[in-house]
Image: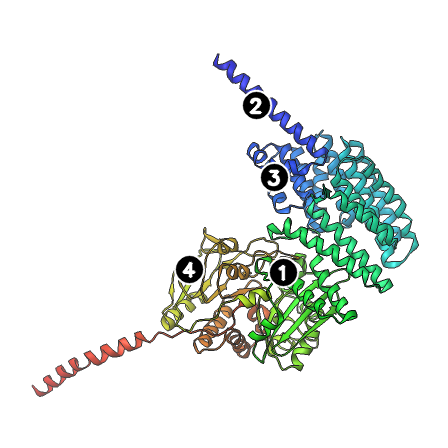
Amino acid sequence: MKLSRYIAIFFIFLFWNNSYSQSMEKEFASGDYLSIIDHAAEIEAENSFMDLFYLARSYTKLNLQRKSIKTINRIKKFNEPCEKVAYHSLLSYYYQIMLYKDSCAYHADIAMKTLYNSQCQDSLLISETYRQYANAMRNGEGYHSVLDRSPNLRTRFKYRNRFLKKYLDTAMFYAPYAEQKGNVYHTMGTMLSDAIYQYSITGDPQYKQYSKEAIDYLNQCIALETSTFLNANAYAIIGLIQYYIEEYEDAEQSFLQGIEYTKVDGKVKFAHRFIVISDWLGMTYETVYRHTQNKEYLHKANEIYKASVKTWDLNIGKTLYNDAYHNSAKGKLIKNNLDLFEVSHDSTYLFEAFDYLERSKYPEFYNEQVSINEIQNRLSNHQAFVSYGSVNRPWRNIAFIITQNDFEVVVSKGELMMNSIAEFHTLYRFNDFQDFKKRSNEYYKVYFEMVDTLLTQKGIDKVIVSNSDNMSLLNLDVLVADTLGEKWKDLNYVFHRFKFSYALSAGAFLNQKKTGNAPNSFGISLGNYKEEANLRFSKRLTQNFNELYGATNIPIDENILKKDISLLLSHGEGGYNQSSAVVKLNGVKSVSSKDVEEMKLDNELVVFSACNTNASQRYFSSGAIGSFAKAFRKAGSKAVITTSWAIDDQSNAFILERFIDHLAKGISKDEALWQAQKEYWNQCSSDEEYNPLYWAPYVLTGNSEGLVLEKETHKFYFSVYWYLLLFPIPLFILLKRRFS
């Protein structure tokens, strides 16, 4: 009886689980990705491969990339060949959305090779692997010589399209239902749009010939009527193609049609897709404005961008991260309002531009009451607050330069993209002098040269920088004003002329608390490592600070929760591809920026001296999402010093010792840090020691005022007291013996 009951329960569970997977497949085939996501908890609990596969694809479709990569990592644990194919194909799709082209092509190549060597019979997985392979290899020159066989760009596109079309034809052959066929048609149209884009750059009519074929594929996708989401995508690409071939009225109608498909009953259902299409529609209006100089098109662009920002705030903005295609509605609103100010001289547009600049970074710190006048009231006559914003298509850097008595706006041209890991590593890699000099000067010209000119004219030497969202991790100390120097020592670093500190935003600058006048307690937390790191100079520094200031080596939690000044000397593992910076405290224990964010702090200064403590992923309209600078400021610390790259223990100990010494003399934090770096600079004996690697990693974020730090005097007075008390005793004994 019991056996039959167990068998019955098993078959009931088997039937339920199978029907659940079939239901999942049906929902995905109809484009009902939200319904799948609603069952995420059950799917993760069941841990079924196919259900996780549909869940990961649904997350990626709706641009929920953090949830997508977590689900993909769960799939990684499955070991069957078919499951390995799916893992690498999904990972390729994820990297494509995140614009990591090399990783996208790499994993697509692995997925295809694994498929060739497996007995996988699942038609959906086969179709999706071929489709994603063709999609990824749009940037796959390193994997197939046929993709790069001709120096003639036009001929190269011809070979490429013919080659990739074979993979898409195979994907179509295996596509098991209409939704997957629609995906393949969409990819065919998108692939051809790459060639059509060249027409918008070169004006070569040969590229225009692809437009009809591409639009035909996309219309076939729409005709399948599989899902409103896929139709929105198809109309968006049709509009983009029409934009490329300068059919702006048709492009407008296609984009508007795509936007309608993102809504249900008049409300936005697919928020990210709405934002993407709105961005392209606004771009179309801006282009028409440049052709006609009719400012009504700027107003139309602004209206669609404002709708995009509102949708962001109501939906995606709750996560505080702007993933994937780096939509830039806030940046566009900055530039468009500045353009409207130029033609109308209405200052309302100028202040609205500043408001959107403020909203474009760190939503947690946005304060709608922030004004330029308030910032001016906080500045001394030698200080300037420089707030940056960024706009793409075409790329522009915008800077509001605010001093005590006036403010100016500068707009610089030139493309600076620090989204890819390689870009940051190029600037912050110091093993190639010529390459560093070139890259550093490029960033200077585009980002700081015009600002430098104005600051110099005004006699400013202290600069509080609020970097743009996309450039939130730029350390200005390493920028060089020219390329004349042939040694590290001879480079014209802007560091020599300006004392930089940083604010996450204008709101964060105004909300930072004043420094108190009472003496501050001082604590040190020194990491304990056996193999990972040798911090012998930091150990010596700890001993010196204990003798001079009574700073004891205590656990990190106690230090940052109870001490006014916290010095943390550790081994960092942060990186520019990580969502949360991490520092190891010993061989097993670590602390992350997310841990710090959840704390309630009120300390005056945290010096987090470890490798890469200011490193993090960063996004448009979010800034650096996981750096310790942001984490400590959000938790309540008034100021924090972090590092932009891997630091050298010896030079770090030298600079920190001088920095603390200057603080104890009552010097402001920015001045104290600058003087400590200059003192290191002045004692260098070899050119290698002038390398920015050793002296420039520090980023001071938050309150830059001085604070009260007193040296230990009680040990000295205690010794003198006992000396005076005990000295008469041996003297008395000596005299007694002499007289005896």
* SS under mark 4: helix
Whether 665 is drawn above or below 257: the answer is below
| Kind of residue sitting beneath label 3 | Lys
Q: Is residue 430 visible?
A: no
Question: Mark 2 is on which residue type?
Answer: Phe
Single out the mark in the foreground, 4 or 1: 1
Q: Which residue is mark 4?
A: 561
Q: Secondary structure at mark 1?
A: loop
In primary-sequence order, the first of circles 4 and 1 is: 1
Question: How far is disc 3 from disc 2 in space, using C-alphas?
Answer: 25 Å
Percent across and percent down for residue 126 are 73, 34
Q: Is residue 683 above or below residue 252?
A: below
User: Within 10 Å of the Cα at label 3, are there few (<14), some (14-19), or many (20+) other Cα atoms?
Assistant: some
**Can you identify the residue that label 3 sits on?**
76
Question: Label 4, label 3: how many angstroms apart (C-alpha)?
Answer: 39 Å
Across and down, in percent, residue 699 comes to 56, 67
Amino acid at dot 1: Lys
- Residue 100, numbered circle: none
Q: Earlier in the sequence, mark 3 or mark 2?
A: 2
Q: Which residue is mark 1?
A: 361
Visual colour scheme = rainbow
